[in-house]
Amino acid sequence: MKPAPFDYARPDTLEEALRVLAGRSGAKVLAGGQSLVPLLSMRLAAPELLVDLNGVPGLDHVTVDESGVRVGALARHADVLAEAGVRRVQPLVPLALEQVAHATIRNRGTTVGSLVHADAAAEMPMVLRLLDGSLDVVGPTGRRTIAAADLYLGPLESSVGADEIAVEAFFPALAERSGVAFEEIARRHGDYAVVGVAAVVTLDADGRVSEARAGYLSVSDVPAVVDVTEELGGGVAPEALEVAATGALLDLTPETDLHATAAYRAHLVRVLTARVLTAAHDDALRRAGDHSGGA
Amino acid sequence: MGEATPEIRHEIRLRVNGVEHELAVPARRLLSDALRHDLGLTGTHVGCEHGVCGSCTVLADGRPVRSCLMLAVSAVGLELTTVEGLAAPDGTLSPVQQAFRECHGLQCGFCTPGFLTTITAGLEANPTPSEDEARDMVAGNLCRCTGYQNIVASVLRAAELGAEEAGR
């Protein structure tokens, strides 16, 4: 099918984009379009106006410093993956990006666009949420920063206002003595995951787990994060992992859809939670070792 | 509903296979349709039209993209390459095309344009892929005839042909 007709604006500046957006209801912002264009073609979305950001300069940056990674609204997933510093400062970002659709889609799709699209089955909203990142938006009253914890309201619904444009995402750097892991189960390579889980584990000076959090995609209708520090009780022995996975499930309500039953999702949550916590713990040990040994 | 006002057409310039085209299209025209219907470049095939099958893959500034997931109006300023732009002007097949011919990398041919463009860019980025990397290179493209074996063989053969060409 083809998209329904819509008006189209391709502003040259952010100010003009905001002006166009403020003047109309029923408008959508277009960046990479890898989620939006299929929605248009299937007529699941029929905006009256598309405001195309692709003509606005200065939005395609990927900036890395010791505090974290900043990603501009027009940076494609592939650009973020190609920036070598990203892996060093926040390795969870490339781990998850590699699971976003296929390379061809990542060449056009933007990371910020994916964050705003707010699909609970997508990788990057969950990663932003797990890392306690944030999203900067500009609107008629200026620029504001939305914490990831306040970003996701419901299925495909974010707290970015209809008259606002997301301009930059911030993924905080990995803390010292910390490790990450990401794993998802999909029916076919590149498909949406049935369930995906990521974890960040931090060790104290004695090598005991001082903080452990896991993020979940495709389990609830918004990206979910569960703190399992207490459940782990300092380590990742099989019994502790069992307690953590059980604890995580108490905070989650897996849902049934075409792709999986709630019971199967719960099973995957258990299995993947244990796996990624173990892997993130190993990663933290390795990084802590590298840090002390490599000085 | 049913209003008679004609849709606004946007005058745009698209650069395709090194040639600049002027066209007037409604904003909702998909790039795949602009290539096929407005420019007559029917080598780009449309399969699923929602980004899954990969048949419509073209190169934008050398990177594979789904032309069915882009609006023509949003493709201005990009250097586009379609399957028509892969062979030399005298018709000599590119290494990837030659490899598909030699290795029986196509049967019905519907998906082939998307494979050819994807692999052309893939070998540009990685001229000496392993078999696993060759498989990964085409992971985003569907083929219902070949079972992929001969396509993977074609990727490896194209890498050989490319190396020979570079060595000459």
Image (cartoon, coloured by chain):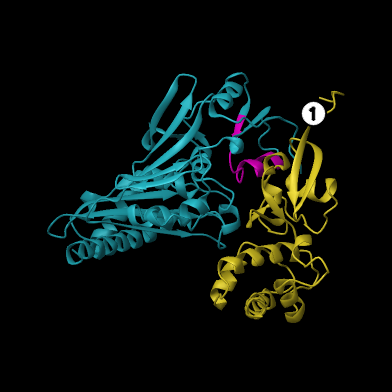
Chain colours: A cyan, B yellow
**Image quadrant where one finds the C terminus of chain B:** bottom right
Tell me if residue A111 is in the magenta stretch: no
Percent from the top left, x then y, of residue A202? 23, 53
Which residue corresponds to the image point at 72% horizontal and 30% vertical from the top-left?
A6
Q: Quadrant of the N terminus of chain B?
A: top right
Image: A121 above or below A294:
above
Question: Which percent across, then down, holds residue A119?
Answer: 51, 43
Q: Quadrant of residue A183?
A: bottom left
B131 displayed left or right of B78 = left
Question: Quadrant location of residue A16?
Answer: top right
Secondary-structure class at tag 1: loop
Query: Residue flagged by tag 1: what amino acid is it?
Result: Ile
The subunit carrying tag 1 is B
Question: Hey, which quadrant is residue A55 in on the image?
Answer: top right
Q: Nearer the viewer, residue A93 or A196?
A: A93
Instruction: Find residue A109 and report its horizontal and vertical position in percent.
Output: 57, 47
Q: Is residue A37 inside the magenta stretch?
A: yes
Q: Which residue is mark 1?
A: B8
Badge 1 density bin: few <14, some 14–19, many ≥20, Cα 10 Å? some
Q: Viewed as shown, does residue A177 lie left or right of B42?
A: left
Q: Is residue A54 above or below residue A199?
A: above
For the point 77% across and 72% down, which residue is it? B93
Residue, far left: A206
Q: Is residue A241 visible?
A: yes
Q: Observer-nearest residue: A80 or A213?
A: A80
Tell me, yes or no, if residue A219 can be seen here.
Answer: no
- Number of marks present in the image shown: 1
Magenta range is A28-42
Looking at the picture, tell me which residue is in the foreground, A246 or A24: A24
**Residue A248 point in image, percent of width and height:** 33, 49
